[in-house]
Image (cartoon, grey):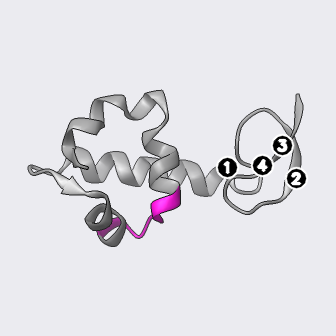
């Protein structure tokens, strides 16, 4: 385990991962919301429109799309 700074709230915590235990449920909720949004979409979206439609910040969208679990969703994004 390491001493880390949470990517969401900026608090320091000791654990694996990039978010603190308090923010983990929020992160999981947003990631499932994003996956559901992209699974149900027929067209490609810009990052701005995904952020607007889902309410997920651009900062968090960039973090999520950097994860391996979102590799299959990248073709649905107009960069």
Which of marks 4 and 2 precedes in the sequence? 2
Badge 2 marks a residue whose secondary structure is: strand
Instruction: Name the residue located 49 percent from the left edge and 34 percent from the top edge.
Output: 67
Question: Where is mark 4, residue-wise?
Answer: 21
Percent x, y of residue 34: 37, 52
Vertical position of residue 79 compared to residue 3: above or below: below
Q: Is residue 39 above or below residue 8?
A: above
Q: Where in the figure is residue 14, as x and y percent of width and height?
A: 90, 40
What residue appears at the point 77 percent right and 49 percent down from the top-left corner?
A: 21
Mark 1 crowdedness (10 Å alpha carbons): few <14, some 14-19, many ≥20: some
Label disc, if present, on residue 52 of the rendered structure? none
Q: What is the number of the mark on residue 24?
A: 1
- Residue lying furthest front: 79
Q: Residues within 10 Å of mark 4 (few under 14, many from 20)?
A: some
* Label 1 residue SS: helix
The answer to whether residue 45 is left or right of residue 63 is left
Mark 4 or mark 3, whichever is nearer to me? 3
Q: Earlier in the sequence, mark 4 or mark 3?
A: 3
For the point 58% across and 52% down, which residue is it? 27
Q: Secondary structure at mark 4?
A: loop
Position of 61 with respect to 52 (left or right) is right
Numbered badge on residue 4: 3
Specify the segment rendered in magenta.
Answer: 53-59
Q: What's the CA distance linking mark 2 and mark 4?
A: 11 Å
**Between disc 3 and disc 2, whose residue precedes?**
3
Mark 1 and 4 residues: CB-CB less than 8 Å, in contact? Answer: yes
Which quadrant would the N terminus be assigned to in this image? top right
Q: Is residue 54 magenta?
A: yes
Where is residue 61 shown, x and y percent of the image? 45, 53
Tell me: 16 left or right of 46.
Answer: right
The residue indicated by pointer 2 is 12
């Amino acid at each position: 385990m390491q001493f880390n700074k949470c990517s969401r709230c900026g608090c320091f915590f000791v654990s694996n991962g990039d978010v603190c235990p308090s923010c983990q449920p929020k992160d999981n909720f947003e990631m499932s919301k994003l996956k559901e949004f992209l699974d149900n979409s027929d067209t490609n979206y810009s990052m701005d429109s995904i952020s607007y439609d889902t309410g997920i910040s651009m900062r968090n969208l960039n973090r999520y799309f950097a994860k391996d679990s979102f590799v299959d969703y990248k073709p649905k994004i107009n960069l």
